Image (cartoon, rainbow, N blue to C red):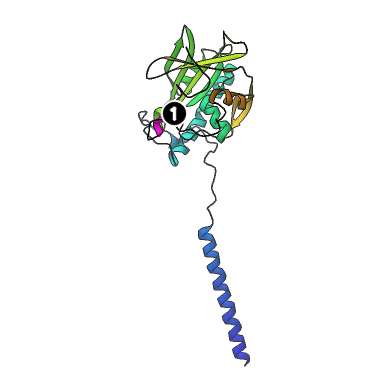
Amino acid sequence: MLFYVILLILILVLSSKQTINYIKKIQQSTRPKSSIHEIQLFNDDNQELFTTNTSKGNLKFYNKNISNKNKIYILMLKKVYKVCDQLKLPVFLSSGTLLGYYREGQFIAYDYDIDMGVFAKDFNMKLIPELKKQGFIHYRTFTSNGKLTELSFYYKNNLIGKKAKIDFFIHYPDEIIPNKIYWMSKNIRTKEDIKYRISDFDIKPALLLNQKVLVPSNTDKYLNEHYGHDWNIPKPPHWLTKTGKGYSYSSSPKSIVKL
């Protein structure tokens, strides 16, 4: 009798061990893998982000390509602020880059450039040669009525090619309405000037994906005046929609002034 009792106990112990192991296997197979945030601090010698072929850039921004874009954009900002700190030039996030920082805490997935602003009273033309030393290519300058309005740069030899792009918009006090400022761009298709006008603002330090940046002190007010009260609702650009209708920098912002 004792023999059968011991045998029964052994069978129960073995069965329970198998059951526990089986449960563990299920838990391991269904448990989400631990993930590291895709934005990490990295050194300039991270070769996986670079290529000698500058013509690359026909990448759709999703999955790994978004990760590569974000890493390269942070590297670009790191170099820009290194130069601007040396020049004592307070450049700040503007337009779509500011919207991404405030609404999403990162760059907007479908955005294809970095937007920066600088007040005309602070601007220094040394920015161009100093950025060239950091690996940027100055490829475009816009002016309007003799005023410098926009400078554009590519960051050379990287995996997203000419989508590694940064625009600097010069912000001027408005001549018509007190306490307002404006900046300008051009409609690439029609070559017409585009003027944006919002309330004047101060700037303050902030962090974008661990990178120190400057932003308008009242970012909420900036976004309300520039994009409208529904700025917190993502609006895909026209080139991403099947109908061709969507957000356009040349017509959608509420801050656009008729010229």
Above or below, comparing residue 24 to residue 76 in the picture: below
* Quarter of the figure that contains the N terminus: bottom right
Q: Position of residue 8 (x, y in %)?
A: 59, 85
Is disc 1 placed on a helix, strand or loop? Answer: loop
Instruction: Please state which of residues 189 and 121 is positioned toward the viewer in this rendering.
Output: 189
Is residue 6 in view?
yes
x 60%, y 25%: residue:
215
Q: Please check the rendered image and state whether residue 84 is part of the magenta-colored stretch, yes or no.
A: no
Q: Position of residue 248 (x, y in %)?
A: 44, 26
Q: Quadrant of residue 137?
A: top left
Q: Please check the rendered image and state whether residue 243 is part of the magenta-colored stretch, yes or no.
A: yes
Instruction: Please state which of residues 62 and 89 is positioned toward the viewer in this rendering.
Output: 62
Instruction: Please state which of residues 106 and 222 is positioned toward the viewer in this rendering.
Output: 222
Task: Report the span colored magenta.
Answer: 237-259
Above or below, comparing residue 50 to residue 120 in the picture: below
x 54%, y 29%: residue:
99
Q: Position of residue 39 (x, y in %)?
A: 53, 38
Type of amino acid under label 1: Ala
x 61%, y 82%: residue:
9
Write down the residue under mark 1.
164
Label 1: how many Cα within 10 Å (few below 14, some 14–19, many 20+): many
